[in-house]
Image: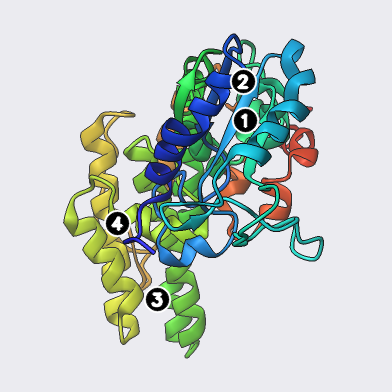
């Protein structure tokens, strides 16, 4: 097999060199969009050799107009007959979906018979409804935005169209980042969630609960990292790639270093000092960006106790002031369900999108 090639590049070349000529020969008048978006580490550029073991390889989505969906079976028949068995050393043929593993398919080498490729044919609307739970953006409310999976927003907007007769790329442009009120709400929520535990890294340690201190610190670190994505106006991926993506954000190195020091600290004093400094550095960034009125920030004692805090609730309150007059002005600062790790059964399931939406609606 050739040297590993990133999936997005592999799929682009596969479409351009192999699939497009087949479509041009057999369906010369067909208008379509072909590209790579949605599921997969390859879509967001984090795939490696390990990623190639399932649902990875020469593949793409083929989007058709509704009136052309009657050609789907014929198109797949032509692909099955004319696609090669391999491309650049990778199997173009894939196994049947594994019913015991969420329909996962694996590259399966064959030397004869029809090819079963990893090509999905849908209309843009049906794909967006199944992947995001919505296909129209003109009247999205703040609660609609908060009902979307953040990772899925990333996976849609990080995709690439190899040919785009149907204008799918332009259609996805409004999804490229949160509207201002939703962005502010997310910032306020993460600072509020930090504030709820800001004194506990030290307090847990005081009563001999070292494990509790570590867990609180880790939760606060995660919230600070989410703030990093928000301040960089970048969607955060789900947990597998969260740390990798954070490391690549254009943030001051000192913020990343303090978070890392807090997580790796060998004792509670170092842990508390580092997580407090990380909060101060992130709060200084907040002030530097001019998002709200300037918030006084200093590391100080928590109401006379020895625990070190910056009173992160002040930043949350400053953001709350900016939310006055919006639909989110009096919604509890819980953030998005995408911010709760391992909650994907609820946060990513489109069947539950309206239930998620109701969390952010008045009455």
Q: What residue did someone put label 4 on?
A: 247
Residue 299, by quadrant, is: bottom left
Q: What residue did someone put label 2 on?
A: 26
Secondary structure type for disc 2: helix
Q: Nearer the viewer, residue 95 or 192?
A: 95
Where does residue 268 sit, x and y in percent of width and height?
Answer: 34, 82
The alpha-carbon separation of the residues under discs 1 and 3 comes to: 31 Å
Q: In which quarter of the image is the C terminus?
A: top right
Q: Earlier in the sequence, mark 3 or mark 2?
A: 2
Q: Earlier in the sequence, mark 1 or mark 3?
A: 3
In the image, which disc is placed on residue 202? 3
Q: Earlier in the sequence, mark 1 or mark 2?
A: 2
Residue 2, by quadrant, is: bottom left
The alpha-carbon separation of the residues under discs 3 and 4 comes to: 27 Å
Where does residue 38 sit, x and y in percent of width and height?
Answer: 57, 39
Please tell me which residue is depicted at 31% across the width and 86% down the height of the picture. Answer: 266
Q: What residue did someone put label 1 on?
A: 330
Secondary structure type for disc 1: loop
């Amino acid at each position: 097999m050739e040297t590993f090639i990133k999936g997005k590049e592999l799929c682009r070349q596969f479409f351009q060199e192999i699939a497009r000529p087949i479509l041009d020969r057999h369906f010369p008048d067909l208008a379509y969009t072909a590209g790579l978006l949605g599921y997969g580490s390859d879509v967001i550029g984090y795939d490696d050799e390990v990623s190639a073991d399932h649902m990875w390889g020469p593949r793409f989505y083929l989007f058709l107009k509704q009136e052309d969906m009657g050609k789907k079976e014929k198109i797949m028949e032509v692909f099955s007959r004319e696609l090669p068995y391999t491309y650049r050393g990778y199997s173009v043929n894939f196994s049947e979906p594994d019913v015991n593993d969420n329909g996962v398919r694996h590259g399966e080498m064959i030397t004869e018979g029809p090819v079963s490729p990893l090509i999905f044919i849908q209309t843009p609307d049906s794909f967006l409804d199944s992947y995001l739970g919505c296909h129209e953006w003109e009247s999205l409310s703040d609660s609609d935005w908060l009902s979307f999976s953040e990772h899925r927003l990333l996976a849609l907007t990080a995709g690439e169209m190899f040919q785009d007769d149907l204008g799918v790329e332009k259609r996805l442009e409004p999804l490229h980042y949160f509207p201002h009120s939703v962005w502010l709400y997310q910032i306020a929520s993460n600072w509020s969630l930090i504030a709820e535990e800001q004194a506990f890294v030290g307090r847990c340690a005081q009563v001999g609960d070292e494990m509790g201190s570590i867990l609180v610190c880790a939760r606060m670190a995660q919230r600070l990292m989410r703030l990093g994505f928000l301040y960089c106006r970048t969607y955060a991926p789900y947990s597998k790639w969260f740390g990798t993506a954070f490391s690549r954000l254009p943030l001051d190195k000192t913020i990343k270093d303090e978070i890392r020091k807090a997580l790796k600290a060998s004792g509670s004093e170092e842990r508390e000092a580092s997580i407090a400094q990380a909060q101060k550095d992130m709060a200084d960034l907040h002030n530097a960006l001019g998002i709200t009125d300037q918030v006084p920030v200093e590391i100080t004692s928590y109401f006379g106790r020895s625990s070190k805090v910056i009173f992160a609730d002040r930043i949350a309150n400053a953001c709350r002031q900016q939310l006055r007059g919006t639909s989110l002005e009096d919604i509890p600062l819980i953030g998005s369900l995408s911010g709760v790790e391992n909650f994907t059964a609820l946060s990513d399931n489109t069947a539950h999108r309206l239930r998620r939406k109701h969390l952010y609606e008045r009455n």
